[in-house]
């Protein structure tokens, strides 16, 4: 009976938040927003957006708590987590996902009930899951999404040991994991002062290799995706991954 009551409360036109989903995920948010509703006097679609913002903030704060020891994408032991969110216990992550799943399902129900504005807001809340994840990746320096850290370390190595990278012709110099790259990735320096390999074609964020600087069709696969930046007029900083999960 209690579950039926909550379910009706979620989908009732008189509900402070006319949306639904897994009861366990919506219940706490519904209580908070029902207390705020008489004060704010918001229309239904605004309450949906408010609920999404509050849950997104909670999603972010829980992630920040479990990843507080990560700085610039590296934990105190020098380990680079596969994704930053990988440090959040699976149980918490699944619990946080429930509202977004519930919002999407409630959005589909609202479409069938011809409540199009509510449906748009609910589905938007569902897809906003990327916002707290992106925000956490940004403040913790996830090294797959934000590659400034590894490239900075490659630049420090290159400028500190410049003579080790000078050769008569073009050369792809391995640095292995000295730049603390993302998982499945390695660090490299391309020395190509005469543009023999046309490495300029590979400047940019993660993409399939375009220039002849990177061997392809060989095992093990090391250059499935590359992220390339210029170090100076003669050399390039390279992150290369043999597997990107794509």
Image (cartoon, helix red, strand yellow):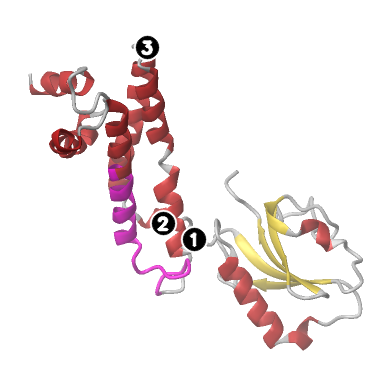
Asked whether the residues under the numbered discs 2 and 1 touch, taking CB atoms below 8 Å apart as contact, a structural biologist would say yes
Name which residue lies at 92% across and 71% down. 194
Residue 147 visible at all:
yes
Which residue is at 33% across, 39% downward? Answer: 97
Q: Label 3, secondary structure: give it.
A: helix
Q: Front-most of 99 and 215?
A: 99
Toward which corner of the image does residue 195 lie, by quadrant?
Answer: bottom right
Number of residues whose C-alpha sits closer than 10 Å to that of mark 2, classed few (under 14), some (14–19) or many (20 or more): many
Q: Quadrant of the N terminus?
A: top left
**Segment colored magenta:** 54-76
The stretch drawn in magenta includes residue 144: no
- Disc with the residue nearer the chain's start (2 vs 1): 2
Q: Mark 1 — residue?
A: 142
Identify the residue at image location x=31%, y=32%: 46
| Nearest to N terminus: mark 1 or mark 3 | 3
Which residue is tagged 2?
136
On screen, 125 above or below 66? above
Q: Is residue 90 left or right of residue 164?
A: left
Q: Which residue is mark 3?
A: 112
> Quick one: label 3, few (<14), some, or many (20+) residues within 10 Å?
few
Residue 165 in the image, given as x and y percentages of width and height? 78, 81
Q: Residue furthest top?
A: 113
């Amino acid at each position: 009976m209690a579950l039926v009551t909550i379910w009706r409360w979620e989908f009732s036109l008189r509900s402070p938040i006319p949306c639904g989903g897994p009861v366990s995920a919506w219940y706490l948010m519904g209580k908070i927003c029902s207390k705020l509703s008489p004060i704010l006097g918001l229309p239904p679609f605004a309450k949906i957006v408010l609920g999404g913002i509050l849950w997104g903030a909670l999603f972010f704060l829980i992630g920040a708590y479990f990843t507080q020891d990560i700085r610039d994408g590296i934990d105190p032991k020098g380990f680079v987590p596969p994704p930053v969110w990988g440090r959040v216990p699976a149980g918490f992550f699944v619990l946080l996902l429930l509202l977004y799943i519930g919002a999407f399902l409630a959005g589909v129900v609202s479409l069938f009930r011809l409540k199009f504005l509510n449906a748009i807001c609910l589905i938007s809340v569902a897809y906003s899951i990327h916002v707290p994840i992106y925000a956490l990746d940004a403040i913790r320096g996830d090294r797959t999404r934000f590659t400034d850290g590894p490239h900075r370390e490659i630049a420090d190595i290159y400028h500190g040991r410049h003579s080790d990278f000078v050769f008569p012709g073009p050369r792809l110099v391995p640095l292995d994991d000295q730049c603390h790259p993302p998982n499945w990735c390695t660090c490299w320096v391309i020395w190509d002062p005469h543009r023999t390999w046309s490495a300029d074609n590979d400047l940019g964020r993660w993409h399939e290799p375009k220039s002849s600087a990177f061997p392809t069709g060989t095992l093990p696969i090391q250059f499935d995706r590359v992220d390339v930046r210029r170090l100076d007029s003669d050399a390039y900083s390279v992150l290369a991954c043999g597997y990107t999960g794509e």
